[in-house]
Amino acid sequence: MRVSARCIIACAVFPIFLGAQAKPDARIEMLKAELARSIDGRAKLAQQMVDQVFSFGELGMQEVETSKYLTGVLQQNGFTVERGVAGMPTAWVAKWGSGSPVIALGSDIDGIPQANQKPGLSGRIPMIVGAPGHGEGHNSGVPLNIIAALAVKDIMTREKMSGTIVLWPGVAEEQLASKAYLVRAGVFNGVDANLFAHVSDEFGISWGDESALTLISAQFKFSGTASHAAGAPWRGRSALDAVMMMANSWEYHREHMELAQRSHYVITDGGDQPNVVPATASIWFFFRERDVERVTKMFEDAKVMARAAAAGTFTVLDTVQVIGSAWRPHMNKPIAEAMHRNAQRVGMPAWSADDQVMAKAVQRLMQQPDSGLTTKVGPLRTPTDTPAGGTGSDIALDLGWCELSVFGLAREGGRTSSFNGAGGSADALTHVTSRFGIERMMRELTRQVQA
Ligand SMILES: [Zn+2]
């Protein structure tokens, strides 16, 4: 689906001029108008990049061509690129400029399994059956961040403005796998504001706690003993039995969990073929709840069931591997307010009749009301608008926890989030991380729990 550049740009660009928000400055107002024109003037490049990344459709940690292409565009435009960041081959950081403020722009780049799709069609028609594709719009975010960065860079150069623009990709977002590692690797140290963009049908700008759930993604691997399933089944110990017993235990347990929980699993290894008793089997769970305590309890309960399943099937719980996690999002208020003012100023894109026809066709395909695309910028969402208990999780947004302190450095002086406890220094991150739980997440993420 065609995506508007301006949606993201309005959010991404203007916080650089946060200092001017308190009293409107004629020069800043003029520059903002110029930025909007400059962004519109890059519509062709936006379309090319969005389509090019769509064509790659690579899964998490395999975004090889995607990253090569996007960093190539950035290098051609004067950015310095560091690749293989935080030990992830497809992660990178691109920088331009110098000095303060340091504004980081992030967006996801990975695809979804089996989401391959012919572009521009409202029907479900894959180009290659079974291949991955961009089912969640992750082809659009970084290209539009690049458009924003190039437009700002031009003006900063001409006006001799100090400041550093940092671009980074959300590698393997679908596996909730990468962003905490970027934090730990120090990618965001010294960053004044981190602006994350995700495709949506609206300007979804909010501050404070978001409704998305805290999540732990973990895989449980069992090992048994192979044997011929017909010739000598008594010699075998089926690891698949353990997987199925664990899954069944979880289903019985589900009745006794709180309503807000979400949990789901797939069997990633169920053996090779029916006549061989599976010597290995694995089950991959997502546990979601409202907060760290509840989601950790779910994970601990699952470990008890995994051990019991192994005992009951005379197999071994080989490994419990934490694949990723996402904490409940928390967003900064002054920056959200500044973004929202700019979103209102720019307005929603002027959708063409074709855009609306396409959107309505997709909505009907998904059996949703065919209301078409939104034409008005919605209100800024506050924590009271977003009570806990949403159904998704987003690892991008848990970065908000560690950037509380960073946001305190924003050019609005004392105006910071009410949750800001870091005293306005990036060095004070340790205090904030322990206070809000991200430290535990980091520890948990790296832990390979031996059963
Ligand atoms: Zn996404």
Image (tube, rainbow, N blue to C red):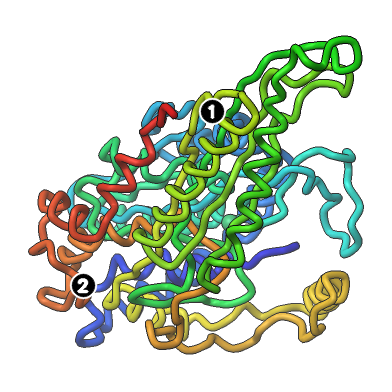
- Quadrant position of residue 411: bottom left
- Observer-nearest residue: 149 or 307? 307
Pick the quarter of the image with the N terminus: bottom right
The amino acid type found where label 1 is placed reads Leu
The residue positioned 52% from the left and 41% from the top of the image is: 218
Residue indicated by mark 2: 419
The residue positioned 36% from the left and 70% from the top of the image is: 14
Ligand 1 placement by image quarter: bottom right
Q: Residues within 10 Å of mark 2 (few under 14, many from 20)?
A: some
Pick the quarter of the image with the C terminus: top left
- Quadrant position of residue 4: bottom right
The residue positioned 59% from the left and 88% from the top of the image is: 376
Residue 301 relative to residue 400: left or right: right
Q: Which mark is residue 363?
A: none
Q: Position of residue 349 (x, y in %)?
A: 62, 77
Q: Is residue 280 above or below residue 152?
A: above
Q: Residues within 10 Å of mark 1 (few under 14, many from 20)?
A: many
The residue positioned 71% from the left and 50% from the top of the image is: 134
Residue 177 relative to residue 354: left or right: left
Q: Which mark is residue 317?
A: 1
Task: Answer whether residue 45 is visible to the viewer in this image.
Answer: no
SS of the residue under disc 1: strand
The amino acid type found where label 2 is placed reads Phe
Ligand 1 neighbours mark 1 (CB distance < 8 Å): no
User: What is the C-alpha distance between the residues marked 2 and 1?
Assistant: 41 Å
SS of the residue under disc 2: loop
Q: Position of residue 109 (x, y in %)?
A: 57, 45
- Observer-nearest residue: 171 or 311? 311
Earlier-in-chain disc, 2 versus 1: 1
Task: Answer whether residue 170 is visible to the viewer in this image.
Answer: yes
Residue 127 relative to residue 78: left or right: right
Which is more foreground, mark 2 or mark 1?
1
